[in-house]
Image (tube, rainbow, N blue to C red):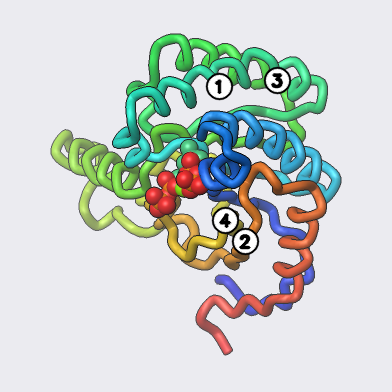
Amino acid sequence: MVTETSSSDIPKHVAVIMDGNGRWARARGLPRREGHRAGAESVREAVEACKELGIGYLTLYAFSSENWNRPRQEIEALMILLERFLKEKTPEMHKQNVRLHAIGRLDSLPDRCRNELRRAIEATSGNDGLNLILALSYGAREEITDAAKAIAEDVAAGRLTPDEIDRELFASYLYTSAFPDPDLLIRTSGELRLSNFLLWQISYAEIVITKKFWPDFRKADLHAAVEEYTSRQRRFGAI
Ligand code: IPE
Ligand code: IPE
Ligand code: MG
């Protein structure tokens, strides 16, 4: 049973909607891709801050299902950056004992990205430090739909009865089945929406919105968000 906590504890799992790269670039008269490039540095900052704080899981929303609707050139630039990021940063992540995971409809990614991703996940699979989860081609409605479909198939095949379907079972069919639910959700760039991110998993997450654009996000900002989190009273519906 979940009980009231004063939540002075450090969150086990932090999830971040990394938003504002385009506006960061526009404010400097640069093309949007420069904002995405600068955002990669913030990923390193977030990873380091999580390690310092002893956070177990960091999920980063890097590319949504809806982001496929952007202009082709921007999608291509993002995919090239992703591939380069994985190639260049994996050795460093490995050294830092980071274990990489990915959630989303990964089959939609270009082959080169997917291969680089697979390589990075395999290379870090023996690590037991921070779990870094990249949400790529990710949409919560797609995830929930995929889970419903897989459950329906198992029922139809006689592997499962409808009576067995409860919260725990449903969660075990989500892309995130191996991870605890996020305790803290951070969104940068001041937007007050979820944009199809982890709709099931963040049911009781504490939400912290910062006005800073993602490329300006630094370790101190993650520390500040966690401090804000620890000051919240999580009630989970109790009094
Ligand atoms: C977030 O920055 C990165 C991705 C969604 C891939 P945006 O590209 O959404 O930047 P803004 O929101 O247009 O400023
Ligand atoms: C959410 O940001 C997706 C990612 C950060 C990857 P968007 O910029 O795509 O969200 P909207 O369109 O403002 O809701
Ligand atoms: Mg945006």
Residue 193 point in image, percent of width and height: 44, 62
Q: CA distance from mark 4 to mark 2?
A: 5 Å
Q: Earlier in the sequence, mark 2 or mark 1?
A: 1
Q: Is mark 4 within 8 Å of ligand 1?
A: yes
Residue found at x 58% / y 66%: 207
Q: Nearer the viewer, mark 2 or mark 3?
A: 2
| Three-letter amino acid code at the position of disc 1 | Leu
Q: Earlier in the sequence, mark 4 or mark 3?
A: 3
Q: Nearer the viewer, mark 4 or mark 3?
A: 4
Q: Quadrant of the C terminus?
A: bottom right
| Three-letter amino acid code at the position of disc 4 | Ser
Q: Quadrant of residue 75?
A: top left
Residue found at x 46% / y 10%: 112
Q: Which residue is label 4 attached to?
A: 189
Judged left or right of residue 115, residue 35 is right
Residues marked 4 and 2 touching at CB (< 8 Å) = yes
Q: CA distance from mark 4 to mark 3?
A: 25 Å
Residue found at x 40% / y 38%: 138
Badge 4, how many Cα within 10 Å: few under 14, some, many 20+? many
Q: Earlier in the sequence, mark 1 or mark 4?
A: 1
Q: Which mark is residue 81?
A: 1
| Three-letter amino acid code at the position of disc 3 | Lys
Is there any visible trace of residue 168 in the rendered image? no
Badge 2, how many Cα within 10 Å: few under 14, some, many 20+? some
Q: Earlier in the sequence, mark 2 or mark 3?
A: 3
Q: Which residue is label 2 attached to?
A: 211
